[in-house]
Image: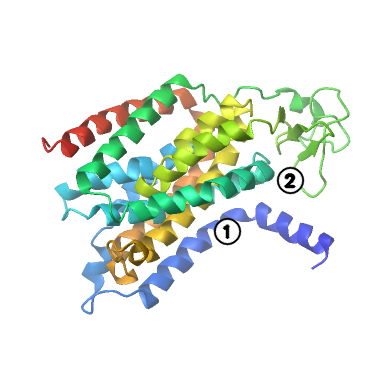
């Protein structure tokens, strides 16, 4: 395929990404219904048993994608504490697997939305994912042999750390953005492709293959200039690889073990290395989505490699994921609109307090009190 044809396909995909994004869960649900190993007596009651998970996971996916953290950070505690109140308790490895499968779809949906807006540094994301892979795989394999009290204690530590980091870090989406893009608009509200999007500087990238006045340029010294589809510009460097690697190695281990961690620690490391907030959140979605997909595959197929629990496809609660997957995909698409309507600090505070409360309950469970 020629470069021109590839660019045309990519541009068309991003322009109509909502159609493709919502087709994915439809194909998944149809595939599960016709091909997944289910109980022999599975009927309408089986498939509709967990319909109420759709609004729950929709709300959770919208919250976590707005802040830019892992979906399982909310899904896993929900499945541990609230789910058993209306259904039978799940095994820890099944909880993590449901959370990861749902999160993988939700973050993939949100990631495409961020790519469409030009807020993903793909070179940075692929470098981080490459370094995190062995830690994600190792953490996922550990989940098969770690005792349940230790599992709950590790979850508590991860959530408490995430709560502290969320309160400590400024995640306001408006930081560093330019409001001068309106100067490039004509009387009809259309952006003039020849106008500078930052109020007069003519050296900003403007890629004709991207939607809107968007583009990215890296100079010989490694300084990155990025313009999103709305005309806001961001300047940063990709330095600080070792610091990010340290955070993503720890976060990747928890991502595989508990279903979250890479997003919470990863967003902190990128902001700490001066990556602009919106670019950090967008790039972090790609990292967490890819690591969640990897961890999901290990959780489904990897139990036998370590002599732990053998999780076959038949052990997956398919009547749950047929509702959680569409819910998280929808939440991933809603999140950008919510982030524009609400202060991110408000949602960040809610999630931080929730993490702290859940971590206390997990520590009590690990100690055998709860």
364 or 314, nearer to the observer:
364
- Going by the picture, which residue comes out furthest to the bottom? 40
Position of 136 compared to 151: left or right? right
Query: Quick one: label 1, few (<14), some, or many (20+) residues within 10 Å?
Result: few
Q: Quadrant of residue 324?
A: bottom left
Seen at 49% across and 41% down, the residue is: 249
Query: Quick one: label 2, few (<14), some, or many (20+) residues within 10 Å?
Result: some
- Residue 59 visible in the current orientation: no
Seen at 43% across and 26% down, the residue is: 166
Q: Are the two marked residues, 2 and 1, in contact with CB atoms closer than 8 angstroms? A: no
243 or 201, nearer to the observer:
243
Name the spot of residue 40 as percent of width and height, x first: 23, 79
Seen at 80% across and 37% down, the residue is: 217
Name the spot of residue 37 as percent of width and height, x first: 32, 75
> Dividing the image into 4 quarters, which one contains the N terminus?
bottom right
For numbered disc 2, what is the local secondary structure?
loop
What's the mark number on residue 19? 1
| Mark closest to the chain's N terminus, 2 or 1 | 1
> Dividing the image into 4 quarters, which one contains the C terminus?
top left
What's the mark number on residue 211? 2
Position of 73 compared to 5: left or right? left
Q: Quadrant of residue 19?
A: bottom right
């Amino acid at each position: 395929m020629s470069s021109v044809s590839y660019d045309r396909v990519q541009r068309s995909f991003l322009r109509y990404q909502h159609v493709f994004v919502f087709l994915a869960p439809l194909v998944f649900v149809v595939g599960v219904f016709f091909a997944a190993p289910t109980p022999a007596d599975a009927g309408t009651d089986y498939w509709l048993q967990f319909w109420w998970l759709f609004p729950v996971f929709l709300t959770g996916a919208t919250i976590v994608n707005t802040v830019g953290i892992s979906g399982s950070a909310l899904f896993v505690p929900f499945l541990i504490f609230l789910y058993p109140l209306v259904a039978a308790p799940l095994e820890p490895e099944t909880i993590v697997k449901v959370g990861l499968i749902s999160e993988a779809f939700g973050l993939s949906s949100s990631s495409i939305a961020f790519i469409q807006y030009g807020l993903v540094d793909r070179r940075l994301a692929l470098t981080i994912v490459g370094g995190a892979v062995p830690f994600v795989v190792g953490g996922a394999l550990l989940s098969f042999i770690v005792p349940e009290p230790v599992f709950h204690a590790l979850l508590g530590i991860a959530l408490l750390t995430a709560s502290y980091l969320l309160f400590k870090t400024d995640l306001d989406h408006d930081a560093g953005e330019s409001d001068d893009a309106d100067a490039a608009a004509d009387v009809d509200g259309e952006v003039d492709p020849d106008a500078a999007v930052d109020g007069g500087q003519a050296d900003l990238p403007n890629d004709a293959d991207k939607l809107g006045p968007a583009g990215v340029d890296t100079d010989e010294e490694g300084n990155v200039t990025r313009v999103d589809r709305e005309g806001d510009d961001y300047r940063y460097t990709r330095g600080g690889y070792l610091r990010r690697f340290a955070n993503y190695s720890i976060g990747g281990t928890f991502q595989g073990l508990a279903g979250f961690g890479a997003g919470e620690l990863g967003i902190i490391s990128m902001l700490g290395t001066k990556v602009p907030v919106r670019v950090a959140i967008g790039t972090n979605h790609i990292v967490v989505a890819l690591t969640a997909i990897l961890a999901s595959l290990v959780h489904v197929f990897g139990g036998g490699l370590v002599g732990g629990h053998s999780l076959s496809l038949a052990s997956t609660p398919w009547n749950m994921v047929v509702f959680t997957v569409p819910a998280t995909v929808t939440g991933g698409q809603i999140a950008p609109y919510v982030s524009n309507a609400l202060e991110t600090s408000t949602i960040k505070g809610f999630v931080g307090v929730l993490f702290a409360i859940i971590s206390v309950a997990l520590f009590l469970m690990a100690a055998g009190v709860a």
